[in-house]
Image (cartoon, rainbow, N blue to C red):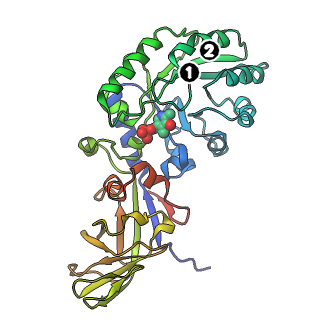
Amino acid sequence: MTESPPRAWAEIDLSALLHNLAVARKLSGKEVMAVIKAGAYGHGLEETARALDDCGLPFLGVANAGEARRVARAGIKTTPYILGATLPAERAEIAVNGWTPCLCSLDEIAHFNQLGRAKPISAHLALDTGMGRGGFLPDQIPEALVAIKSSPGIKLTGIGSHLPVADEDETFTRQQIALYDKIATTIPQDHSPFHIHISNSAGLMKYRSVTSNLVRPGLLLYGISPFPDEQKQLKPVMSLKTRISVINELPKGHGVSYGRTLLTRDTKAAVLGIGYGDGYPRSLSEKGTKVLINGTLCPLLGRVTMDQIIVDVTELSKCQPGDEAILFGADLLVSDLALKAGSIPWELLTQITPRVERRYL
Ligand SMILES: *Cc1c(COP(=O)(O)O)cnc(C)c1O
């Protein structure tokens, strides 16, 4: 059977992923939990987990039991760590499979204690030092520790917290990490290894928690820095690509796309096979967005449609239908597009839809 290539695809460079992991290790000097939630930020959950499975990581960070199950079913041996509070209906599966939850409430402690009667469950204690998304507040920690102490079904093997403004507010983040480090020294470490962690990508790049022995980068592993100045040392893992389907010669004054953006000059307009149905944000319309074709940045014309965009290739001496176009990658950063779209790189990466074929290099 003849099978046509896709119109839009994402090239995933797994050697870049390993490069970025090495950067995370070097910058932090700590062990790494690779955060692979949300389909590894759009890079493919199983494929990314497989690439990281032999790297000696203690955990792969996932969002829920469903993602942990996919990782386990793919034959990955690294332990999934569930990054947020668990739903009651997820806990039996988590317990039975030996995935690591973080305990965010007394209800979770009581429930996991029950589920761990036959075989104790390794779990971390979640501390809320400022995120407000789950975990015990500093003054609730003694009560949580008492509950855990009287729970033979739970083995406390770590503590974790999360930074809400590591890329925005240095004063708060310094205070938060100091508070976390102070609390961490009061937690009994009856099991070894005992993991202490608070830093996401921004946290590990700009701050130091003296008690932590583990960091939890996501974005950084995919080669995007939360800080533009630190981008150079990273290698973007995903390149989003498409092809020119047709090139139209349009006269000055002619409209382009929905809403009829009027051309201000005679224009060579290339049509590309990607749109918001692929996750290329419609909010990039009319923002001075560029697309890379044959090494030249070409301006987006008019609005992004569901399956196609139109690009001004008037200045391009050489281009023809079938030529490749890069929407983002190493030379056109998804973080810069996100700024234009009024969004963040985390959102742009995770919203690339299944229609975009992932190709692993
Ligand atoms: C998503 C997430 C991370 C990773 O954050 P990045 O900013 O992508 O590095 C780390 N910890 C927790 C709890 C998360 O939810």
Residue occupied by mark 1: 136
Q: Amino acid at mark 1?
A: Phe
**Numbered mark located on residue 121 in the image:** none
User: Ligand 1 closer than 8 Å to the CB at disc 2?
Assistant: no
Residue at the spot of label 2 = 144
Decide: is 328 above or below 242.
above
**What residue sits 51% from the left and 42% below the top?**
36
- Relative to 87, 330 lies left or right: left
Q: Is residue 38 left or right of residue 303?
A: right
Residue 212: image x %, image y %?
Answer: 42, 20
Residue 277 on image: x %, y %? 51, 68
Q: Which residue occupies 62% across, 28% down?
A: 100
Q: Residue at x 38, y 48 (%)?
A: 16
Between residues 188 and 281, which one lies in front from this camera angle?
281
Whether tag 1 and tag 2 are in contact, CB under 8 A, the answer is yes
Front-most of residues 325 and 335: 335
From the top left corner, tell me how far across and down residue 76 is, in percent: 60, 40
Q: Residue flagged by tag 2: what amino acid is it? A: Ala
Give the distance between the C-alpha atoms of the residues marked 1 and 2, in whole angstroms: 8 Å
Q: Is residue 34 visible?
A: no
Q: Secondary structure at mark 1?
A: loop
Q: Answer yes or no: is residue 284 visible.
A: yes
Q: Nearer the viewer, residue 36 or 26?
A: 36
Q: Residue at x 71, y 19 (%)?
A: 120
